[in-house]
Amino acid sequence: MWERIIALVIKELLAILRDPRGRMVIIVPPILQLVVFSYAATLEVKNADIVILNRDSGKWGHELIQRIDGTPTFRNLIHTNDDEVLHDLIERQEVIAALQIGPTFSRDIEARRSGDVQIILDGRRSNAAQIVSSYLGQIVATLADDLATPRQRAASVTIAPRYWFNPNLTFVWFTVPSLVAIIALLIGLVVTALSVARERELGTFDQLMVSPLRTHEILIGKLTPPMMIGLVHITLYVLAAIFLFGIPLRGSLILLYGSAIFYLASVVGIGLFISSLSMTQQQAILGAFVFIVPAILLSGFATPIENMPDWLQPVTFVNPLRYFLIVVKGVFLKDIPVSEVVHNTIPLALIAICTLSAAAWLFRSRLE
């Protein structure tokens, strides 16, 4: 039996590596995803442009502008004295925010009264606008704190936040570990989905069905090569995360790879199921991407699952990416305990059993 399975595994690997489209799927998407997600797909706000309308002729209005200009977040500060210009710049999306300083700002500060500052934000870019508003609010609050009397400082409440597991809120520390799971999903699903569909296009699927190979042997031979390729990509991304991006690895690699085996098995099971339903490689690729996009959106990678509607959250329970993201980020950033790894690996094993059983049933029905 094992000789037959090994021969089928070698045949599958050669079919993937000799096919130009197969090689492209293995090499090109991982490189593009590493570049796009690590450097371009960021929720940080940098190089923002704002317009300032300063109606105050005193020194404190000028001081506030200088502090805003000195921060690396803002690229261009456009000064204007016309309300229409301010509104026009926001309407054309040339700036994300506008700051208006009231005419009595310096006078109110000298008299120990509240100064008048208005921030106008472009609500069409809601996430970036909220972050810019927080930056500007922090600068104004810092100026107010510097101008406060010792008695006022003593009476005020000072908040000193501490960010566990990612002290500097470095966005790459969040994206690159997640790529370990996302790339394994992309490669494992596409490579597997093309497997049976390629056999049907070449006319060798029926030969495979009438060969001495049994159904479970075909299943093992089909799922082993994508799992091997997936483990190679996981290893490459782990090495890139540690040595290229300098992300700390606080947990156990043994736990990571142990969970990765069940994760890849569940992904390959889904890919084999899609491939069994597809008649051509084009249908298989389309079917794989129909699953990949919702899987990423419903995994908690971009938005927390808790923020999703109540009727949609149960759908995420059948998404293998949801569970492995917890494991891989936990291993990298917080030394996740064994119990937590097991808690998130059991659903992966159940998904793998269900999908591989469904694929085996489709193979058997095809044979009959």
Image (spheres, helix red, strand yellow):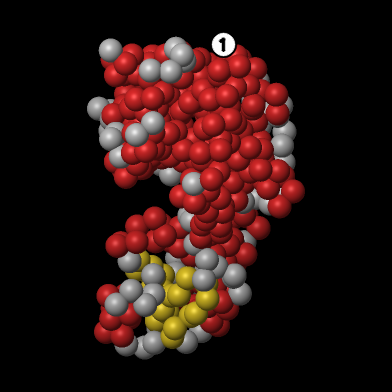
Q: Is 364 on the left or on the right of 239, as rendered? A: left
Q: Quadrant of the C terminus?
A: top left
Q: In the image, what residue occupies the spot 25% across and 27% down? A: 311
Residue 53: image x %, image y %?
40, 81
Is 120 on the left-hand or right-hand side of 20? left
Q: Is residue 68 above or below residue 222?
A: below
Taking depth in this image into account, of 181 and 249 the one nearest to the observer is: 181
Above or below — where is 19 with respect to 116? above
Q: Nearer the viewer, residue 261 or 272?
A: 272
**Residue under the point 65% across and 50% down:** 168
| Residue that numbered label 1 is attached to | 1
Residue at image location 48% in from the left, 80% down from the top: 77
Amino acid type of disc 1? Met
Q: Is residue 284 above or below residue 221?
A: below
- Is residue 115 depicted above or below 340 in this figure? below
Classify residue 1 by image quadrant. Answer: top right
User: Could you say where residue 125 lies in the image, as x and y percent from the top left?
Assistant: 34, 61
Residue at the right extreme of this rendering: 243
Q: Is residue 312 left or right of residue 106?
A: left
Quadrant of residue 17 in the image?
A: top right
Estimate the x, y position of residue 133 in percent, counting from the top left.
Answer: 43, 61
Q: Quick check: 200 left or right of 6?
A: left
Tell me if I can see residue 23 in this picture. Answer: yes
**Badge 1: few (under 14), some or many (20 or more) residues near its Cα, within 10 Å?**
few
Q: Secondary structure at mark 1?
A: loop
Residue 158 appears anywhere in the view: no
